[in-house]
Image: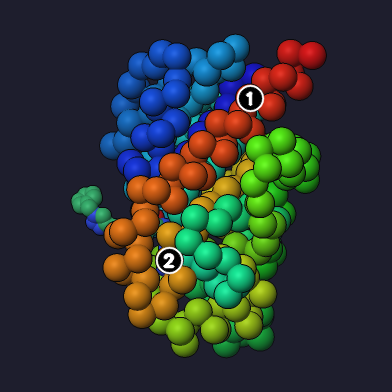
Amino acid sequence: MKIAIMGAMPEEIKPILEKLDAYEKVDFAKNSYYKGKYKSLDVVVAYSKIGKVFSTLTATTMLEMFACDILLFTGVAGAVNPDLKIGDLVVATKLAQHDLDITIFGHPHGFVPGGSVYVESDPDLRALAKIVAQKMGVEVHEGIIATGDQFIASEERKEFIAKTFKADALEMEGASVAVVCDALDVPFFILRSISDAADMDAGFNFEEFVESSAKISADFLMRLLDELIERLVV
Ligand code: OS5
């Protein structure tokens, strides 16, 4: 069993790499992949760089070239749901591309023929996350994540995304990773910790909280990995 662990930025995978027992760096397609061991598990860790194109390339590489069996994504997100505060954890139930728009042909936002507006994440991994949250005594929210190639710092755009996709959080990579995993039939899990509220303060808040929120997400992901190992061994 080989697990892919992905982030988009260095900050998002740094706390993961620090917890690996050993790893080697393999360069491919202008990116670095860290092949290593975490306890009994083989893992491949990488940050893709920002956005849907780079995250698609990295997810595909991890599944096809490194032959990973499960993909786990960790990182930060902007809050859409006003109940979500900085540092809160959000597990994606399903993901959509908020900037995919061929509505002029009568299709809904986020839809292209042959695809679907939403891609659902793996229910078993979500259930495991609930067990981990309970054991840790932390609250983990489940919700819809909207993805697009834009850093959102506007109430107007945020409202559009909230209304159109019923999104709870937004970011720039999750839905593209979801499309890749769904197409290749690989179970995936997308976890984000809130770094900002996608509003006019988002730029400042993001810079202030990216590191701490990225660590909250990465630390939870490692606990999920521990739980996965227990279940795979027993
Ligand atoms: O990966 C991008 C999406 N992430 C989630 C997120 C988000 N997405 C959209 N809207 C929001 N309000 C969001 N809040 C959180 C975070 C990330 C956002 S883009 C951040 C770019 C930051 C940056 N720019 N330059 N550097 C960092 C330094 C640098 C310079 C050269 C090469 C590499 C890094």
Q: Residues within 10 Å of mark 1 (few under 14, many from 20)?
A: some
Q: Secondary structure at mark 1?
A: helix
Q: Is residue 234 left or right of residue 34?
A: right
Residue wearing tag 2: 196
User: First in sequence: mark 1 or mark 2?
Assistant: 2
Residue extending furthest front? Answer: 137
- Is the distance from the Cβ of mark 1 to the nearest ligand 1 atom less than 8 Å? no
Q: Quadrant of ligand 1?
A: bottom left
**Image coordinates for residue 28, horizontal then vertical, percent:** 34, 30
| Quadrant housing residue 30 | top left
Front residue of this view, candidates 60 and 192: 192
Residue shown at 52%/23% (left/top)? 43
**Image coordinates for residue 18, horizontal then vertical, percent:** 39, 26
**Image coordinates for residue 54, horizontal then vertical, percent:** 39, 49
Q: Is residue 178 visible?
A: no
Type of amino acid under label 2: Asp
Q: Is residue 116 left or right of residue 9?
A: right
Task: Compute the Cα span from label 1 to label 2.
Answer: 29 Å
Residue wearing tag 1: 226
Front residue of this view, candidates 8 and 204: 204
| Quadrant housing residue 135 | top right
Q: Quadrant of the C terminus?
A: top right
Q: Secondary structure at mark 2?
A: strand
